[in-house]
Image (cartoon, rainbow, N blue to C red):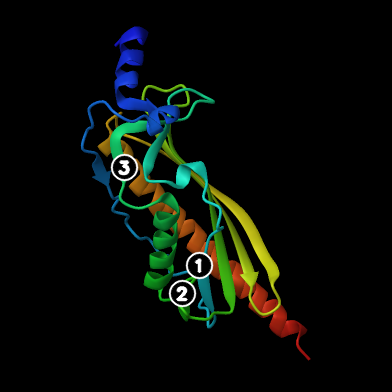
Amino acid sequence: MNTSCRNLALLCLFLPLAACSIVGGPRESPAIYAPETRISTDPAWPQASWGVVIAHPGDARLMDGQRIAVSPVPGELQVYRAALWARSPSEMVDDVVQRTLEDSGRIATVARQGSGISASYRLLLDVRTFKSDYAGSATPSAVIEVNAKLLHQEDQILVGSRTFRQAQPASGTDVAQVADAFSQGLGTLGHDIAGWTLQTGQAHQQQAHRGAP
């Protein structure tokens, strides 16, 4: 496919963000995508007797809505036509991290903020990037970037902070293929954040016990 044909095909797939508020014209019934994430744990993770509550910043970012963001060229952000996420990116990230921690069997308690369950630590997850990115290639990658902060609840000490990034190549340009790439990327991201949380929290616990009189 030559460059002109490829650009025309991309225009048919994408909708500029500025057009999201336009009223009138024919409406397409959107396809709803709910990535099915495979949970992966590691038996080498430490056993924790403490618990964690998962939270995220109150200010929603542009890419935390249900429209599926795509960057066809560097510096330009659009959305796929007639395609939506079933849940927001922050909800998907929270869910995969919680499920990974629960399925690991390595932590006493894991819950979401607002559940009424108290825990020793709070895991703050800030979804910075959640988009399909062509980055000059013929097919896009599912790019997810999340900053994780682990805070000790009792004294509000920041125990650790780390930014996690996944770029999972899609098998094609169809939105369904892009959604599948997000599913794979979320699984890897959940594994990495869960493992880091257990290791960082456990290291803090051991340090606190060594310093106790």
193 versus 12 height, above or below = below
Q: Secondary structure at mark 2?
A: strand
Where residue 143 appears, x then y in whole percent? 46, 40
Corner quadrant of residue 126: bottom right
Q: Quadrant of the N terminus?
A: top left
Q: Earlier in the sequence, mark 3 or mark 1?
A: 1
Q: Earlier in the sequence, mark 1 or mark 2?
A: 1
Task: Name the side, left or right, on which 196 lies relative to 131.
Answer: right
Residue holding disc 3: 84
Task: Name the side, left or right, on which 179 lies relative to 197.
Answer: left
Q: Quadrant of the C terminus?
A: bottom right
- Residue drawn 47% across the image and 22% down it: 73
Asked if disc 1 and disc 2 are in contact, CB closer than 8 Å, the reply is yes
Q: Secondary structure at mark 3?
A: strand
89 versus 98 height, above or below = above
**Distance from label 3 to label 1 (Cα)?**
25 Å
Where residue 2 appears, x then y in whole percent? 33, 8
* Residue 54: assigned label: 1
Task: Name the side, left or right, on which 140 lies relative to 76.
Answer: left
Instruction: Point out the frontmost of discs 3 and 1.
Output: 3
Residue holding disc 2: 110
Where residue 3 appears, x then y in whole percent? 36, 9
**Distance from label 3 to label 2 (Cα)?**
29 Å
Considering every residue shown, the one lying at the far front of the view is: 24
Q: Amino acid at mark 2?
A: Val
- Residue drawn 44% across the image and 62% down it: 97
